[in-house]
């Protein structure tokens, strides 16, 4: 469910509140300090009351965003989980430790029942708390989706609760008195959360929004409380404990300051990885220039139609993470200058020198290498390339669904680096595998859900437009692939985006449905820019205004489909029935017609490629003669087709 929510957020391009580090950081520190203070100075009931009173209004304030609310919600739930059932458990522990073993034989089945009771109580408490939050939140006007996303935290809390119950069991085995038990329980509960939390932080680093609460809150909270309880139970030697007792308030103050520093340090660390600092971007510039130089010399780029001239590139300036100055991309083959800064409204999408690599323990994969593209307003732009060439990575970069290592993307004049919140509102994205759909929700529920969470809802009745009426009560999991794609696109359009990103939306869709979907899109998105990836070359040829070929993360060719096909206008594909004599190939070579001899003996139809100058008729004469003399049965000629260009590009670039 957590993943599903994560995917859905990146998938829909609606204005789901993104992580805004500064407000989050401030709130986080405050909450942490407050929780820590409460945990050492107050009774359980007062703690709960205080946390709820403070956290509730903050949590439902939209301006603090989804994650801030989420974290505060977590703070409250955490307190409930740790403190409330603890009271109950203490009663059981007391009974056992004080010798009423006959009443509560803590072994076998009864132990199992005990754990079950513990977890059910905790679950019930969490659920009741959630319901109260939901009702109060809805009355106060919070958006429903915020609460839906909070639901994802419940399983994590239940897991924590289970850990605590197991821990209690371990602790009470070596406790001789109730006092002992209470003290040990305090230390162990807190310490017990440090390792899982750190591990959670380590493994969850692909989902920074979740790392934050995990990494900073729980460990810091736990360590502080463990130290505090350590003093209380006299774990430290007598002189240290008496110093502690005498200077209780000062020490508490120092501890709180240390705690704030830990939180701030961790948040700064995370901040760096989330939003790249200006200095970091600038320092990357020198490296990027070198890469571009190298790129210009490379086989792949020389093959290209559109490339960045180095002088022009050097005129780019990035100041304060924003693109300034003359932004000019030009096609070195036909000197067709595309001047972005002369584009008065700064519309369209400028992808400028974007690089992204994925690092794993074994190697680094360069998914996008210095990608430069200018996608004009209201055009359907296709990104083509073999599997793993970097298409999806590029789509995600435009949406900021993942960070980029260098470069910038400017959407309608706004940089994703500095204005990503605004940019996100303008983009609708439909990623592969229907990532934004929830299996259990029906078609109509999807549309309502996405409509509820968007900032600029479209007027269009997508149920009717996408002919989804007859499927409206079907759950997403009951839809066929084609209908799922339709629903995904409809969801992505709910926020009325200016830019629609469609990542392989027609994969697994039959030819008729594909045609219908594209016709519909062309109609609905007349005033929108579409960036689409596909493996279906026919689709690119038929529906896209321009296409870019991406190979090993680099753009190798970009332009109108016809222009690209014409690149090969001197290349001819021959289909020959029969076997041509070897002398034919030598003879043609002398006439400067290169025919590749890849004939296979015994094969009825031979597919050959020929490259001619202006003397193609000589080739035809020779083939005609062979046919008349019955050396070959027949031959036919096809002009270079778009898909053959595609294969050629792959061959040349590999
Ligand atoms: N999260 C990730 N972690 C590590 N490597 C990744 C990740 N996402 C993508 N890659 C790698 O980056 C490269 C580009 O992947 P990407 O998904 O962008 O390609 P694609 O062109 O969309 O492929 P396909 O056509 O199969 O969807 C691939 O080698 C892929 O294995």
Image: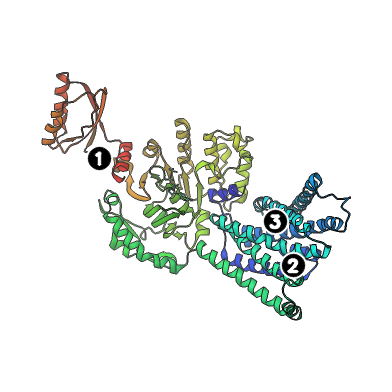
Query: Splitting the image into 4 quarters, where does residue 441 fall?
Result: top right
Q: From this view, report whether residue 241 is shown above or below residue 473.
A: below
Disc sitting over residue 141 in the figure: 3
Q: Nearer the viewer, residue 66 or 648?
A: 648
Mark toward the viewer: 1 or 3: 1
Percent of width and height locating residue 513: 48, 32
Residue at 72 percent across and 73 percent down: it is 236
Foreground of the two, 505 or 28: 28
Residue 172 percent location from the top left of the image: 78, 58
C-alpha distance separating marks 2 and 1: 74 Å
Q: Which residue is pictured at 32% across the width and 46% down the height? A: 559
- Residue 399: horizontal and vertical position, in percent? 49, 53
Q: Quadrant of residue 292?
A: bottom left
Q: Label 1 vs label 3: CA separation?
A: 61 Å
Question: Is 26 placed left or right of 140 in the picture?
Answer: left
Q: Quadrant of the C terminus?
A: top left
**For mark 2, what is the residue?**
39
- The CA distance from mark 2 to mark 3 is 31 Å
Which of the two labelled residues, at mark 1 and mark 3, occupies the earlier sequence position? Answer: 3
Disc 3 element: loop
The answer to whether residue 139 is left or right of residue 517 is right
Alpha-carbon neighbours of circle 3 within 10 Å: few (<14), some, or many (≥20)? few
Mark 2 residue element: helix
Pointer 2 local density, CA inside 10 Å: few below 14, some 14–19, many at least 20: some
Mark 2 vs 1, N-terminal side: 2
Camera-near label (2 vs 3) is 2
The circle on residue 121 is none
According to the picture, the residue beneath numbered tag 1 turns out to be 568
Considering the numbered disc 1 on the image, is that residue within a helix, a strand or a loop? Answer: loop
Q: Do the residues labelled 2 and 3 touch (CB within 8 Å)?
A: no
């Amino acid at each position: 469910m957590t993943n599903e929510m994560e995917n859905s957020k990146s998938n829909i391009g609606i204005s789901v509140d993104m992580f805004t580090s500064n407000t989050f950081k401030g709130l986080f520190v405050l909450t942490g300090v407050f929780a820590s203070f409460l945990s050492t100075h107050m009774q359980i009931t007062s703690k709960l009351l205080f946390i709820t009173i403070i956290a509730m209004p903050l949590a439902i304030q939209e301006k603090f965003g989804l994650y801030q609310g989420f974290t505060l919600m977590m703070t409250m739930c955490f307190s409930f989980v740790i403190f409330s059932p603890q009271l109950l458990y203490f009663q059981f522990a007391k009974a056992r430790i004080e010798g009423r073993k006959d009443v509560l034989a803590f072994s076998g089945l009864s132990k199992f029942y005990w754990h079950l009771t513990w977890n059910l109580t905790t679950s019930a408490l969490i659920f009741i708390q959630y319901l109260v939050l939901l009702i109060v939140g809805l009355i106060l006007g919070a958006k429903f989706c915020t609460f839906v996303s909070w639901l994802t935290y419940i399983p994590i809390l239940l897991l924590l609760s289970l850990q605590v119950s197991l821990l209690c069991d371990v602790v009470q085995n070596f406790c001789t008195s109730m006092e002992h038990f209470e003290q040990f329980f305090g230390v162990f509960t807190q310490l017990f959360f440090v390792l899982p939390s750190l591990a959670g932080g380590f493994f969850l680093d692909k989902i920074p929004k979740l790392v934050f609460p995990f990494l900073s809150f729980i460990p810091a909270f736990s360590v502080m409380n463990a130290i505090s309880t350590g003093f209380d139970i006299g774990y430290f030697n007598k002189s240290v404990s008496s110093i502690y007792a005498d200077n209780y308030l000062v020490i508490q103050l120092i501890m709180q300051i240390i705690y704030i520093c830990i939180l701030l340090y961790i948040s700064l660390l995370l901040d760096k990885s989330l939003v790249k600092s200006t200095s970091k971007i600038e320092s990357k510039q020198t490296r990027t220039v070198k890469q571009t130089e190298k790129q210009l010399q490379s086989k792949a780029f020389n093959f290209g139609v559109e490339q960045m001239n180095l002088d022009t590139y050097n005129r780019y300036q990035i100041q304060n993470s924003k693109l300034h100055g003359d932004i000019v991309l030009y096609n070195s083959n036909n000197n067709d200058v595309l001047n972005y800064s002369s584009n008065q409204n700064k519309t369209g999408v400028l992808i400028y020198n974007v690089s992204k690599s994925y690092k794993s323990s074994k190697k680094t994969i360069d998914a996008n290498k210095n990608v430069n593209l200018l996608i004009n307003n209201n055009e359907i732009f296709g990104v083509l390339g073999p599997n793993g060439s970097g298409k999806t990575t590029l789509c995600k970069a435009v949406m900021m669904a993942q960070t980029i290592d260098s470069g910038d993307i400017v959407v309608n004049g706004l940089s994703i680096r500095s204005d990503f919140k605004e940019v996100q509102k303008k983009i609708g994205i439909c990623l592969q595998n229907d990532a934004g759909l929830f299996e259990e929700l029906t078609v109509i529920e999807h549309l309502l859900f996405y409509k509820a969470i968007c900032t600029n809802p479209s007027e269009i009745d997508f149920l009717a437009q996408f002919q989804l009426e007859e499927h409206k009560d079907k759950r997403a999991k009951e839809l066929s692939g084609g209908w799922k794609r339709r629903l995904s696109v409809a969801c992505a359009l709910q926020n009325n985006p200016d830019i629609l990103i469609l990542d392989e939306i027609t994969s697994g869709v039959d030819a008729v449905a594909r045609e219908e979907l594209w016709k519909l899109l062309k109609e609905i998105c007349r005033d929108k820019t579409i960036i689409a990836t596909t493996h279906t070359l026919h689709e690119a040829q038929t529906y896209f205004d321009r296409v870019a070929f991406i190979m090993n993360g680099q753009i190798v060719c970009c332009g109108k489909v016809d222009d690209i096909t014409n690149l090969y206008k001197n290349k001819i594909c021959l289909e020959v029935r029969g076997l041509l004599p070897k002398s034919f190939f030598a003879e043609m070579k002398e006439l400067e017609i290169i025919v590749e001899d890849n004939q296979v003996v015994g094969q009825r139809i031979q597919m050959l490629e020929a490259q001619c100058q202006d003397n193609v008729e000589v080739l035809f004469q020779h083939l005609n003669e062979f046919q008349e003399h019955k050396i070959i049965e027949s031959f036919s000629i096809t002009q270079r087709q778009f898909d053959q260009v595609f294969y050629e590009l792959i061959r040349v670039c590999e």
